[in-house]
């Protein structure tokens, strides 16, 4: 696979230790052990966090994170809930994001992320699994479905970044660009309050929110991000996805307004098997327990 871009931490050893310390804080807060799995892939090192990995009687779920996040955001405030009791969970730290995986990435418009994701599943010993992705992770899920549909039982997309263009509304651009150009806890909180969450319905506990703020500020200040941004895949690509796809969107997501995502999914996906619009939910839908309960319900029907 050809590497298109490489992102790096400013001080790799020091910054990787910060990430490990952060993960330990989340582990203690959730009283959950995350098994660290290191794989040698075409993008060099890929890290996966596992739960129940030795319980081979349980069906597997593979999760891919959003842009500039860690996949562990999916379990803030124990949002994975009953999923952790009933499934083998593999949370993949997508290469090119500010996490413990290497910063190498394929060209975003190639099939590279799908080839890599299929390789990850193979090296995890997974013949077939449920997959889920939030925002950028939705694009990775669709690439995987295109490249290796035989590996996917069903795909769950949460506020995906692959169905439409990122919103260029002045308000959305302001809150997204503010912490990038002026990274501070205050500006990160403004972004979270106006784009990621929709308080009081969609919010975290104070402890989990502080972990999220800390991580976001760390990623903005310690990571030299070269990763290409998601793009609307369109009918030419999404029309190849013949696996069942389930879509969950928040009606207060300013990054990818839900109406356009629904219209694109209905137009371009051959098997849109389920659709749910959650009221008063922002872009950070993966950190919303209700959304993951819906995913669990759909999985149990398969």
Image (spheres, rainbow, N blue to C red):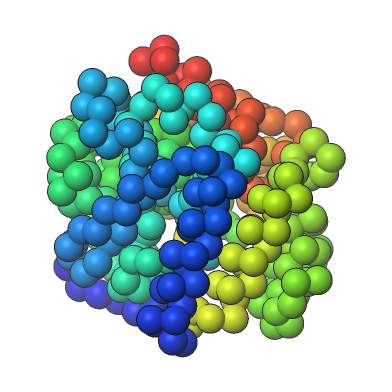
Q: Residue at x 44, y 86 (%)?
A: 11
- Which residue is at a point 80% across and 64% down the rendered structure image? 190
287 relative position to 273: left or right:
right
Location of the C terminus (image quadrant): top left
**Rendered location of residue 214, percent (x, y):** 64, 66
Q: Position of residue 204 (x, y in %)?
A: 72, 45
In the rendered image, the quadrant that contains the N terminus is bottom left
- The image quadrant that residue 290 belongs to is top right
Q: Is residue 73 left or right of residue 153?
A: right
Residue 268 image position (x, y, % from top left): 44, 38
- Residue 77 appearing in the image: yes
Name the one closer to the observer, 2 or 288.
288
Tell me residue 136's x, y (percent). 48, 55
In screen coordinates, is 171 left or right of 261? right
Instruction: Determine the residue positioned at 19% across, 44% down.
Output: 124
The residue most toward the bottom is: 10
């Amino acid at each position: 696979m050809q590497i298109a871009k490489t992102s790096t931490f400013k001080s790799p050893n020091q910054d990787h230790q910060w990430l490990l310390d952060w993960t330990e804080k989340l582990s203690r807060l959730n009283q959950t052990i995350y098994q660290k799995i290191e794989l040698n892939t075409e993008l060099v090192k890929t890290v996966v966090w596992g739960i129940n990995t030795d319980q081979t009687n349980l069906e597997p779920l593979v999760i891919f994170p959003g842009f500039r996040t860690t996949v562990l955001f999916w379990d803030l405030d124990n949002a994975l809930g009953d999923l952790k009791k009933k499934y083998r969970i593999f949370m993949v730290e997508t290469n090119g994001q500010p996490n413990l995986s290497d910063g190498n990435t394929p060209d975003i418009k190639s099939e590279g992320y799908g080839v890599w994701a299929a390789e990850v599943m193979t090296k995890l010993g997974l013949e077939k699994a449920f997959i889920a992705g939030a925002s950028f992770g939705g694009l990775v899920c669709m690439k995987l479905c295109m490249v290796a549909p035989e590996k996917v039982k069903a795909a769950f997309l949460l506020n995906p970044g692959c169905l439409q263009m990122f919103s260029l509304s002045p308000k959305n651009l302001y809150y997204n660009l503010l912490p990038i150009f002026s990274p501070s806890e205050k500006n990160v909180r403004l972004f979270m309050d106006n784009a990621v969450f929709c308080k009081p319905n969609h919010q975290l506990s104070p402890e989990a929110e502080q972990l999220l703020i800390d991580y976001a500020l760390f990623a903005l200040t310690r990571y030299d991000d070269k990763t290409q941004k998601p793009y609307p895949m369109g009918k030419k690509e999404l029309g190849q996805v013949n696996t069942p796809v389930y879509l969950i969107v928040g009606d207060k997501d300013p990054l990818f307004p839900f109406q356009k995502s629904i219209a694109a999914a209905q137009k371009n996906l051959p098997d849109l098997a389920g659709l749910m619009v959650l009221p008063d939910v922002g872009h950070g839908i993966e950190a919303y327990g209700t959304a993951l309960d819906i995913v669990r319900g759909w999985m149990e029907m398969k």
